Amino acid sequence: MGLNWKEIPPDIRSFIEAQKLFFVATAPMDGRVNLSPKGLDTLRVLDARTVTYLDLTGSGNETAAHVTENGRMTMLFCAFTGEAMTLRLYGKADLIRPDHPEWDAMLALFPRLPGTRQIFRLHVESVATSCGWSIPVIGEMQERNELIEWAETKGEDNLEAYRLSNNVVSIDGLSTGYVSDDF
């Protein structure tokens, strides 16, 4: 049924890279667990121990608050087509924003998307599969464009104002580490 590794095996890397949907879970030391679905062309496996994803401006910034506080992150991938499998990547994440020395190099890995806010990098400590036998077969997934269209309509100045209003503090009152001068 389930298997465990300390790094991402090549066949598992292929599975990750083929997914159109993944989930990111984080939690503060004291407060609510956050689980966010992610999509679009925002995920990259850099090597057997490093995964990154481009984070776009959204309604909150819980992941940033939790990663800033303690770094813990789990990424979840489910096989919605083909052979059943659930995959988790466990590790410590860090945050790369425009003021980070690696920003330009990391950003170049992704397509230019409006609303780009930051990049999360997961340093993988453990990889685990489970059967996934209860996960439904969904068929061919199609990407949604609403977030991209929303960010394009807002424009950079209004996105900045939105971030300052909605992305600075988590729902548990933790700082997300967002600083206006970063952008």
Image (spheres, rainbow, N blue to C red):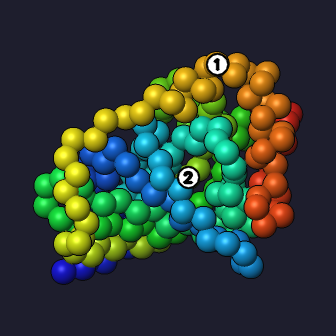
**Residue 178 percent across, percent down from the top left:** 80, 46
Image side of residue 16 versus residue 26, left or right? left
Please name the residue shown 19% across and 57% down the image: 137
Q: Disc 2 vs disc 1: which is toward the camera?
A: 1
The vertical placement of 19 against 136, above or below, is above
Q: Which residue is mark 2?
A: 121
Q: Residues within 10 Å of mark 2 (few under 14, many from 20)?
A: many
Q: Are marks 2 and 1 in contact (CB under 8 Å)?
A: no
- The answer to whether residue 159 shows anywhere in this view is yes
Q: Is residue 97 left or right of residue 161?
A: left
The image quadrant that residue 39 belongs to is top left
The disc at residue 27 is none
Tell me which label, 2 or 1, sits earlier in the chain.
2
Callout 2 secondary element: strand
Image quarter (top left, top right, bottom left or bottom right) of the N terminus: bottom left
Quarter where residue 130 is shown = bottom left
User: Disc 1 marks which amino acid?
Assistant: Thr
Please give left or right for residue 5 compared with residue 160 in the image: left
Say if 25 sits above or below 159 in the image: below
Q: Where does the C terminus fall, quadrant-wise?
A: top right
Q: Residue at x 27, y 45 (%)?
A: 18
Q: Amino acid at mark 2?
A: Arg
Q: Position of residue 58 (x, y in %)?
A: 64, 42
Give the number of marks: 2
Percent x, y for residue 23? 45, 57
Q: Nearer the viewer, residue 81 or 138?
A: 138
Outermost left residue = 83
| Horizontal arrangement in the rendering, residue 161 relative to residue 102 (left or right) | right
* Residue for point 60% across, 38% down: 56
List the residue tagged with mark 1.
Answer: 153
In the structure shown, which secondary structural element does the residue marked by tag 1 occupy?
helix
